Amino acid sequence: MEKEPSISKKADEFLQIFKRGEEFTKDLIKENERLRFRIAQLEESVEQAGNEEKTRLYEDKIKILEDELVSILDRYRKTEEENKDFASKYVDVETENNMLANLYVASYQLHSTLDFNEVLRIVMEIIINLIGAEKFTIFLMDEKTNELVPVASEGLPLGEMPKAKMGEGTIGKVAREGESYFLKDLSSTSTSKVDPASPIVCIPLKIKEHVIGVISIYSIFVQKTTFSNIDYELFNLLAGHAATAIFSSRLYTQSERKLTTIQSFLDLLKEKPRR
Amino acid sequence: MPNILVVEDSPTMRQLIGFAIKRVPGAKVIEATDGVDALKKLSSEKIDIILADINMPIMDGLKLVSLVRGNPSYKNIPVIMITTEGAEEDKNKALAIGANAYLTKPIQTQELMKLVNSFIL
């Protein structure tokens, strides 16, 4: 009979131990959950801290790139402006080059011969091909009569061109004053009817201040509507160089003729004693 | 090394065109004073492009173009007319005969160079 209470007591003790064990296990499970939660929290905060750092880095990089972009755009704009400037300068240089080529060729050709007729032909070629004149006449001064005599003509019959008196009309005034004449409005000029006394351009042929003739232009080609800078340069060149070339070739031709006459005369004198 | 035949009766224009052509790298300028002279040069030299005036003595530029186009050996050579004739009908006539391009005098060397380069390059 004494064994029964001891078994019951032991069973109670065991039950209590088991209950404590159960409670302890429950505590352990709770603690385990709390710790897992804490780990998860910590992992999240670590991850967030990393993302913020990365974001900061990216923002810095974006700022640097944006600054670079502004600088590149600024340089691009400057380069574009420089390009435009260079393009404009290139056009100017090409125009200048064209002008110099024209002046060089005109000057070279004018002084390439001492034949009077050849010089006149070259002057006409320059007026036609380089200036673009369709109808014009070259007058030379006759010192004896003080008149301007037509010596060459293009697009107009030379025989029908009247002489011009010094100081009279546009041609005569240009010859007297030595200043070029340009009609301001070329659009009103007619290419079919030409009045010999009304040129659109009149250029004095001058050696220093001495006028030896006049180039009188009456019309220009249909494709030419106005005179450009190069034309005015060519007019200036013709005024001086054509005058010198015409004058020297005329002197040369005259002296050649005189020399031939003198030579013939000397030959004649040499032959006389033999007879 | 393009060979460029310049057919012009005016020495002034021949010199001016030659001056401009010198700027084409390696270009050689061959000069002829009229159409007949040009045909002689065509038979003796290999020509890559012809620059021809219209108004010339002996044989004019239009006759030259028609002969060039009629000859199997030369028919493919580009021809640029350079003339004082600025009327539209003159231009149309030259192009109808077989000219490839038409420039009026006074010429702008840049314009000429651009045209020549377009046929050479």
Image (cartoon, coloured by chain):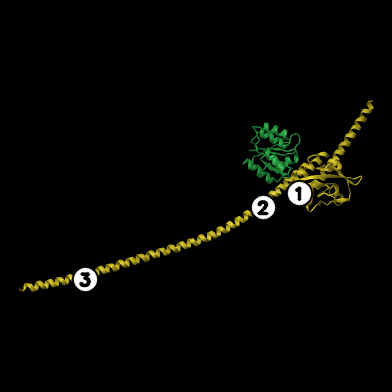
Chain colours: A yellow, B green
Chain at tag 1: A
Judge whether residue A118 can be spotted in this image.
yes
Q: Quadrant of the C terminus of chain A?
A: top right
Label 2 resides on the chain identified as A
Residue drawn at (26%, 69%), measured in percent from left and top?
A30
The Cα–Cα distance between marks 3 and 2, rounded to whole angstroms, is: 98 Å
Q: Give amino acid for label 1.
A: Asp
Between residue A2 and residue A255, name the one nearer to us: A2
- What is the distance, in whole Å, between disc 2 and disc 1 at their CAs? 21 Å
Q: Position of residue A175 (x, y in %)?
A: 86, 49
Residue drawn at x 14%, y 72% as measured from the top left: A13
Q: Quote the CA–CA distance across marks 3 and 1.
A: 117 Å
Q: First in sequence: mark 3 or mark 2?
A: 3
Local secondary structure at mark 2: helix
**Looking at numbered disc 3 in the image, what kind of residue is underneath it?**
Glu
Determine the secondary structure under disc 1.
Answer: helix
Specify whether A19 is left or right of A263: left
Q: Residues within 10 Å of mark 2 (few under 14, many from 20)?
A: few
For residue A107, say whether it is visible: no
The residue indicated by pointer 2 is A89
Q: Quadrant for the N terminus of chain A, please.
A: bottom left
Query: Percent position (x, y) of residue B102?
Result: 69, 42
- Circle 3 sits on which residue? A23
- x then y, percent, for residue A5: 8, 74
Is circle 3 on the same chain as circle 1? yes
Residue type at numbered disc 2: Lys
Using the image, tell me which numbered label, if any, was put on residue A231.
1
x and y percentages locating residue A85 in the rendered image: 65, 54
